Amino acid sequence: MAAGADTAGRPSWAARRRLSAAFWRRGWLRGTFLLLPPLAWFGLLYLAALVVLLVSAFWRVDPFTTELVHDWNLDNFKRIFTEPVYRTIAFRTIGIAAAVTITDAIIAVPFAYFMARLASPRTRAALFVLVLLPLWASYLARVYAWRLILPRKASSTGRSSSSASRRWGSRTRTGRCGSSSRTCGCPS
């Protein structure tokens, strides 16, 4: 009775074996089932962001306080089609987005096919790095900009290695203990 209760909710051994064999014979099916949950989450988050953007297009901005007022109206859409400045900006943005998408597809599909099917492993790795390098460029530029803007912490000797402190001539006197405080009591 206890053994029957343990296996009541589980599929039989033969059913699991058939399912495993089906996934083994059809690699695309295994890949589909592995990629389906993350792709569903990405799609859900993307669609949720688009829905929020669409809903906020029906609201208006108070010109005095610049706060979003939840009055449902079509004024924003009317403004796009009636005022030439907004119409030009909207159509130019849509045109540029379409041109970039088509250009990227024309360049990326043959490049990806070459990387996946024709390139040697060493060439594939080099091309992979060359594709990812521009994506890292803005991130690295931002990191180095913040490193120049923010002062660095003082080193273990108490002296600041910041370029800002050297530039403005701020000098700190440190004692043997490494403290920059004048009240530490140790001789310099």
Image (cartoon, rainbow, N blue to C red):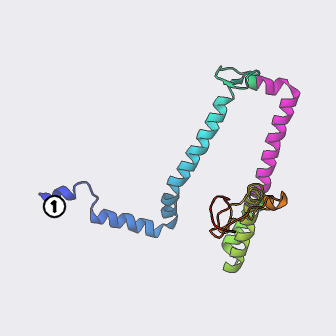
Circle 1 — which element? helix
Q: Is residue 7 above or below residue 66?
A: below
Q: Which sits in the foreground, 188 or 83?
A: 188
| Residue 94 forms part of the magenta stretch | yes
Return the residue nearer the eye: 111 or 23: 111
Residue at numbered disc 1: 3
Which contiguous range is marked in magenta? 77-105
Residue 67 screen position, x and y as percent = 69, 25
In this rendering, the answer to whether 186 lies above or below 58 is below
- Quadrant location of residue 53? top right
Query: What residue is at 73 percent from the left and 23 percent from the top?
Result: 65
Q: Characterize the magenta stretch by its predominant secondary structure.
A: helix
User: What residue is at 72 percent from the left and 77 percent from the top?
Assistant: 123
Instruction: Provide residue 23's location: percent of width, then percent of height.
Output: 44, 65
Residue 95, located in which quarter of the rendered image?
A: top right
Q: In which quarter of the image is the N terminus?
A: bottom left
Residue 125's spot in the image, x, y percent? 68, 75
Seen as rendered, the residue at the extreme left is 1
Residue at left offset 39%, top offset 66%? 20
Q: Where is the C terminus found, in terms of image quarters?
A: bottom right
Residue 120 in view of the camera: no
Residue 95 visible within the image: yes
Left/right of residue 154 with respect to residue 31 in the rendered view: right
Q: Which amino acid does label 1 sit on?
A: Ala
Residue 168 lies, with reference to residue 112, above or below; the image says above
Residue 151 locus on image (x, y percent): 73, 57
